[in-house]
Amino acid sequence: MEEQGRRLRTGTGIQILVATPGRLIDALERRYIVFNQCNYVVLDEADRMIDMGFEPQVKQILDSMHGPWKSTDEDEAAKQEAESKAAKGGVGIMYRTVIMFSATMPREVEDLANKYMRSPCVIKIGDSDSGKNKRIIQHVEVMTEGQKKGRLEKLLRQCQPPVIVFINAKKGVDVVAREIGKMGFRACILHGGKKQSEREDAIEAFKKGEYNIMCATDVAGRGLDIDGVQHVINYDMATSIDK
């Protein structure tokens, strides 16, 4: 923290700061940084931050950024930028803009947008109901815990690899991967308990076909694009369901 604080305080400042909510609040409270010259605020993975319990921290950060905010009218916003750039000494009013990126739009994310953005424009990539892809067939099977291992083996022998198996807990991933290995399959592991380099190696090996199966927690549920995966097995029932 001290080294990061030194870098923030010395020199001519920084142009771009990439931070997690908790560490950014630490820097604010220690007066390593202030937002009086912050022009753009980008919230990446907004829904994920809320899922992880960072909603109070995100609100605290946004509340510390006082206006003025850039106009939602494009012509007026362009005029504001021109006035700021033409100000004496090159220092004018800094009109702030908030941009949010989110894979899903739960109520909490909508509340954030309504509170901290003025008449936000929503840009959607792909179909709004892409989660209900007609080409995807979903099956739900209810069984006891003791039946799951045998059913998993039967499914894996029927499915064309590569296959992704999701398990809720990191420890469970290790156990299931070990059992899959005993069944004669090559399985790699992906969860938050692995180093970043180990996770990257596992993903790359899975893509190259060095492993038939990837056992993972929901850390693999976002941001991955792996060709050829025909089957995804949720070994454990989700702990919560977004409506």
Image (cartoon, rainbow, N blue to C red):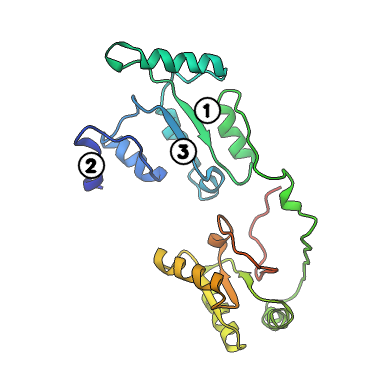
User: Measured along the vertical axis of the image, is residue 71 above or below residue 58?
Assistant: above
Q: Nearer the viewer, mark 3 or mark 2?
A: 2
Nearest the camera: 57 or 224? 224
Question: Which residue is found at the position 19% from the left and 35% from the top?
Answer: 11
Where is residue 151? Give x, y as percent.
72, 80
Residue matched to label 2: 7
Tell me which corner region of the image, top left, top right, bottom left or bottom right, holds residue 106: top right
Q: Can the viewer see residue 127 in this picture?
A: yes
Q: Which residue is mark 1?
A: 116
Q: Secondary structure at mark 1?
A: helix
As shown in the figure, which amino acid type bears the numbered disc 2?
A: Arg
Estimate how packed mark 3 is, as few (under 14), some (14 to 19) or many (20 or more) residues with alpha carbons within 10 Å: many
Q: Viewed as shown, does residue 10 lie left or right of 135?
A: left
Q: Are marks 1 and 2 in contact (CB under 8 Å)?
A: no
Name the residue carrying label 3: 58
Numbered circle sitting on residue 158:
none
Question: Image quadrant of residue 213?
Answer: bottom right
For label 3, the SS is: helix
Distance, label 1 to label 3, CA atoms, is 11 Å
